[in-house]
Amino acid sequence: MDLRAGDPGSYLGGDEIVETAHPGVRALAADLRAAHPGDEDFARAAFEWVRDRVRHSVDAQDPRVTLTAGEVLGARVGLCYAKSHLLAAVSRAGGIPTGLCYQQFAGESGPVLHGLVAVHLDGRWHRQDPRGNRPGIDARFRLDTEQLAFPVAERDFPEVHVSASPAVVAALRGAGDVLELCRTGLPGTP
């Protein structure tokens, strides 16, 4: 897939959702970078840390709503969007340009948005999906080809975003129970 993105340097900063300055995010990035000094190894370690150590809300049946990188890191749970916010923050704090990407799937009550990231390595953008594995889902960090949680989407949005989708932010901020949000109305477009 041809991804559309701006200058990679613009994907290194943080904001109120992708909190690169959060102390926990910075500490995690520093620990991972110390253990994995090469860019590809660091990006893989950050991906695997978020994929494997932060539970997906639905898999965990955890109703807590997390949105920001700091919230996700503290709770160790989140939807795909929230996990992507944490991965983007950790990766950026470690010096890897990282953007947010989206896919669309047909849901029971209409289109549903899925969040993932793209990292800029070797002069190109590579989509990675930190959703979390379970039977039937085997997302891997790969630069040669994509191995996403959901390899076939109804629609792949080619844009690599610096900031989180306003629709995602509004949905999560307005939710009191993330499991109920999943049943009644996840965003359908970024």
Image (cartoon, rainbow, N blue to C red):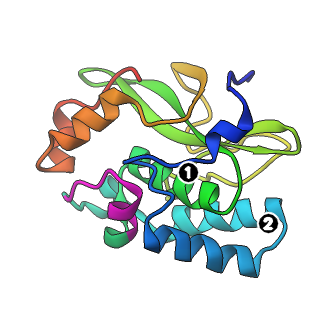
Q: CA distance from mark 1 to mark 2?
A: 15 Å
Q: Residue at x 44, y 35 (%)?
A: 114
| Position of the C terminus by quadrant | top left
**Disc 2 residue type?**
Asp
Q: Earlier in the sequence, mark 1 or mark 2?
A: 2
User: What x and y, as percent, mark residue 100?
Assistant: 54, 38
Q: SS for tag 1? A: helix
Q: SS for tag 2? A: helix
> Does any portion of residue 182 appear in the rendered image?
no
Q: Residue at x 23, y 62 (%)?
A: 62
> Does any portion of residue 67 appear in the rendered image?
yes
User: What x and y, as percent, mark residue 115?
Assistant: 47, 38
Q: Which of these two is toward me, 127 or 95?
A: 95
Q: Which residue is mark 1?
A: 88
* 58 relative position to 35: left or right: left
Disc 2: CA contacts within 10 A as few (<14), some (14-19) or many (>=20): some
Q: Which residue is mark 2?
A: 41
Quarter location, residue 125: top right
Q: Is residue 67 magenta?
A: yes
Q: Do the numbered discs 1 and 2 sit on residues whose CB atoms are within 8 Å?
A: no
User: What x and y, as percent, mark residue 139?
Assistant: 62, 51
Compared with 14, 112 (above or below) is above
Q: Residue at x 23, y 54 (%)?
A: 65
| Range drawn in magenta | 64-73
* 124 relative position to 90: left or right: right
